[in-house]
């Protein structure tokens, strides 16, 4: 039985879909999957052993050059690739109009969430079957339930297996001192943890005997990483990496600290001890999900505001160490000393125990 998954973006959403694929494959071994995904994230579905074919789509790029996309035949090539196989079922796990259109373009019966439990209700016009899944559930469980109802099996919500072959990434390990990874980049200005906090955190890591590795995804993030590298010689700005290369760096790390960003979800998928920082956004429905994960949330009354830029008008929130205003102020609840203490607590069980747990979770 061949199934097409339509989950195109974003990075965190794509990662959130992996446990549902694992559930389905465990319950119905005859299932094989193809997956439509944004070209920037095409590496991720290919990591799962139940996925046969990844079909890249480029909506983000096409929006900027729509005429050129049509004239070059790129969209036609995508459509032909999509329609190459007839599917027993097409699951729209995204719930957007664009993903609904892709589902209908594919050859096969379509399924998705009902109009009462979907982000863009008009997308249901493209489905042959719909399922109602409560909004209040975490995104991982929403997709898992959609799959379980589509294929008529049950799953254990207490167990979450992303199905990734972690040893594939661990094999790329290079000898050296233990290290942690800081995911400092994010799309919303209001999610950015203060640079002065990152610098203090890097110094705390160095005093504890850890090196710090800083990935980046664009010029702005690279410039920030280079400024943070001034914390000491133990801080390293990484080269530009593919997602697979970054997964190799991350899977061999002792821990990670992340703002609310897709790469934080990658740490969770690899069961790397991590602390995720939430201020303007909420962890309730889309927070990192998995073993060895801790969420630090803000005590500020306006948090989470879900605003891309901070609109706080109250009294300044002062840093408890130097007395200077914290910006965004919701991160005043997350001083570096608290963050490092939380990460050390997550890392306490040690790599041996983490590796044992991961080995048991691997798919046969």
Image: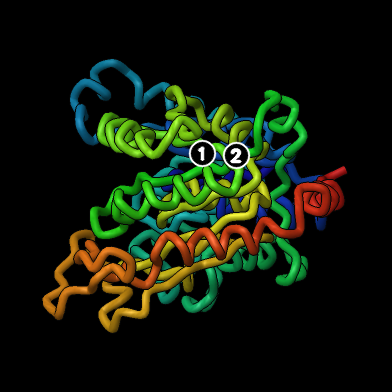
Which residue in the structure is indicated by mark 1?
212
Look at 49% across and 51% down and name the residue there.
204
Reply above or below: 174 against 115: above
Q: Quadrant of the C terminus?
A: top right
Residue that protrudes farthest toward the left in the picture: 313
Specify the quadrant of the image occupied by residue 289.
Answer: bottom right
Residue nearest the observer in this picture, 197 or 311: 197
Q: Secondary structure at mark 1?
A: strand
Q: Secondary structure at mark 2?
A: strand
Q: Visible in this render: residue 11?
A: no
Reply above or below: 71 against 226: above
Q: How many marks?
A: 2
**Contact? badges 2 and 1 (CB < 8 Å):** yes
Which residue in the structure is indicated by mark 2?
179
Q: Quadrant of the N terminus?
A: top right
Mark 2 crowdedness (10 Å alpha carbons): few <14, some 14-19, many ≥20: many
Look at 47% across and 69% down and name the residue there.
296
Looking at the image, residue 260 sits to the left or right of residue 29; the answer is: left
Look at 28% across and 16% down and name the residue there.
72
In percent of width and height, residue 124 lies at: 42, 63
In percent of width and height, residue 190 lies at: 25, 59
Looking at the image, residue 2 sits to the left or right of residue 321; the answer is: right
In percent of width and height, residue 212 lies at: 51, 38
Mark 1 crowdedness (10 Å alpha carbons): few <14, some 14-19, many ≥20: many
Residue nearest the observer in this picture, 143 or 333: 333
Q: Visible in this render: residue 337?
A: yes
Residue nearest the observer in this picture, 87 or 321: 321
Reply above or below: 281 against 106: below
How much space separates mark 2 and mark 1, taking CA atoms?
Answer: 5 Å
Look at 33% across and 31% down and name the residue there.
226
């Amino acid at each position: 039985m061949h199934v097409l998954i339509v989950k195109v973006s974003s990075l965190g959403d794509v990662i959130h879909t992996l446990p549902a694929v694992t559930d389905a494959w465990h319950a119905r071994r005859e299932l094989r999957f193809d997956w439509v995904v944004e070209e920037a994230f095409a590496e991720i579905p290919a990591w799962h052993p139940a996925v046969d074919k990844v079909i890249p789509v480029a909506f983000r790029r096409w929006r900027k050059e729509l005429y050129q996309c049509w004239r070059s035949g790129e969209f036609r090539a995508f459509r032909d690739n999509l329609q190459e196989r007839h599917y027993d079922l097409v699951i729209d796990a995204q719930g957007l109009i664009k993903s609904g259109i892709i589902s209908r373009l594919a050859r096969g019966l379509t399924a998705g969430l009902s109009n009462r439990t979907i982000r863009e209700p008009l997308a249901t016009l493209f489905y042959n079957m719909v399922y109602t899944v409560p909004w209040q559930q975490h995104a991982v469980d929403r997709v898992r339930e959609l799959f379980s109802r589509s294929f008529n099996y049950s799953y254990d919500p207490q167990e979450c297996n992303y199905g990734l072959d972690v040893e594939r990434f661990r094999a790329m390990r290079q000898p050296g001192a233990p290290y942690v990874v800081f995911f400092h980049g994010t799309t919303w200005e209001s999610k950015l943890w203060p640079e002065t906090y990152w610098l203090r955190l890097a110094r705390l890591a160095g005093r504890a005997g850890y090196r710090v590795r800083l990935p980046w995804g664009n010029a702005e993030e690279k410039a920030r990483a280079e400024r943070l590298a001034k914390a000491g010689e133990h801080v390293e700005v990484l080269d530009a990496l593919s997602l697979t290369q970054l997964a190799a760096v991350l899977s061999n790390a002792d821990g990670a600290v992340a703002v609310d960003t897709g790469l934080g979800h990658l740490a969770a998928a690899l069961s790397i001890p991590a602390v995720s920082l939430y201020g303007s956004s909420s962890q309730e429905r889309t927070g990192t999900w998995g073993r060895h994960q801790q969420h630090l949330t803000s005590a500020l009354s306006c948090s989470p505001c879900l605003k891309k830029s901070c609109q706080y008008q109250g009294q300044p929130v002062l840093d408890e160490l130097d007395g200077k205003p914290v910006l965004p102020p919701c991160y005043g609840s997350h001083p570096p000393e608290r963050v490092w203490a939380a990460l050390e607590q997550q890392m306490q069980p040690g790599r041996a125990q983490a590796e044992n747990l991961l080995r048991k979770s691997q798919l046969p």
